[in-house]
């Protein structure tokens, strides 16, 4: 009888503990082509509301053969961190074709961060702010 009572209380407790360990993070992906930016001279923007542990991946048109590259500045709370940055080569054999810069950010704590990204030629005298992309990320 004592064994049944112990099992009766232990099993629900074990289920509760295990269910609290389940990670339900979300991965949001946004992708913008060169045409998306060309048609929006003032830039593009997105607002995200996420939870701690969620990831936001942005895929932005980029053509390294022109000397342009994406860079960003982050302001607001330190609630988001850069997790990864990569470049996907263009498909096919077209010389000088645009590829995709892929940026992944992770929500690390509650707060609001603004990530301002600029597509520019980084050297002195290079073109600046050719394209602009801004993300406002609220972590709840």
Image (cartoon, grey):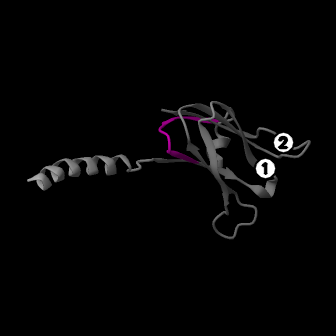
User: Is 26 colored magenta in this rendering?
Assistant: no
Span highlighted in magenta in the image = 44-57
Quick check: 75 left or right of 51?
right
Where is residue 73 shown, x and y percent of the image? 72, 37
Indicate the quadrant where residue 136 lies. top right
> Which of the two residues, 36 or 64, is positioned nearer the viewer here?
64
Label 1 element class: loop
Earlier in the chain: of badge 2 and badge 1, it is 1
Compared with 19, 112 (above or below) is above
Residue 36 in picture, x, y percent from top left: 61, 44
- Tag 2 near tag 1, CB within 8 Å: yes
Task: Using the image as rendered, state which of residue 73 and residue 121 is in the foreground.
Answer: 73
Seen from this angle, which residue lies furthest bottom? 93
Identify the residue at image location x=38%, y=49%. 21
Measured as percent of width and height from the top left, residue 2 is found at 12, 52
The answer, for residue 102, to whether it is visible in the render is no
Q: Does the image show residue 121?
A: yes
Q: Position of residue 88 (x, y in %)?
A: 65, 61
| Label 1 packing within 10 angstroms: few (<14), some (14-19), many (20+) | many
Position of residue 139 relative to residue 9, above or below, is: above
* Residue indicated by mark 2: 127
Local packing at callout 2 (Cα closer than 10 Å; few below 14, some 14-19, many 20+) is few
Residue at numbered disc 1: 68
Secondary structure that dominates the magenta span: strand
Q: Nearer the viewer, residue 8 or 99?
A: 8
Residue at left offset 64%, top offset 39%: 39
Element marked by disc 2? loop
> Which residue occupies the extreme right position in the image?
124
Which numbered circle lies on residue 24? none
């Amino acid at each position: 009888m004592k064994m049944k009572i112990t099992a009766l209380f232990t099993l629900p407790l074990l289920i509760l503990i295990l269910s609290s360990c389940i990670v339900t993070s979300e991965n949001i992906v946004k992708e913008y082509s060169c045409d998306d930016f060309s048609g929006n001279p003032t830039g593009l923007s997105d607002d995200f509301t996420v939870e701690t542990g969620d990831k936001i991946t942005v895929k932005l048109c980029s053509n390294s053969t022109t000397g342009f590259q994406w860079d960003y500045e982050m302001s607001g709370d330190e609630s988001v961190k850069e997790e990864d940055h990569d470049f996907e080569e263009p498909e096919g054999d077209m010389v000088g074709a645009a590829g995709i810069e892929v940026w992944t950010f992770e929500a690390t704590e509650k707060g609001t961060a603004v990530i301002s990204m600029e597509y520019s030629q980084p050297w002195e005298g290079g073109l600046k702010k050719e394209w602009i992309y801004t993300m406002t990320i609220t972590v709840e």
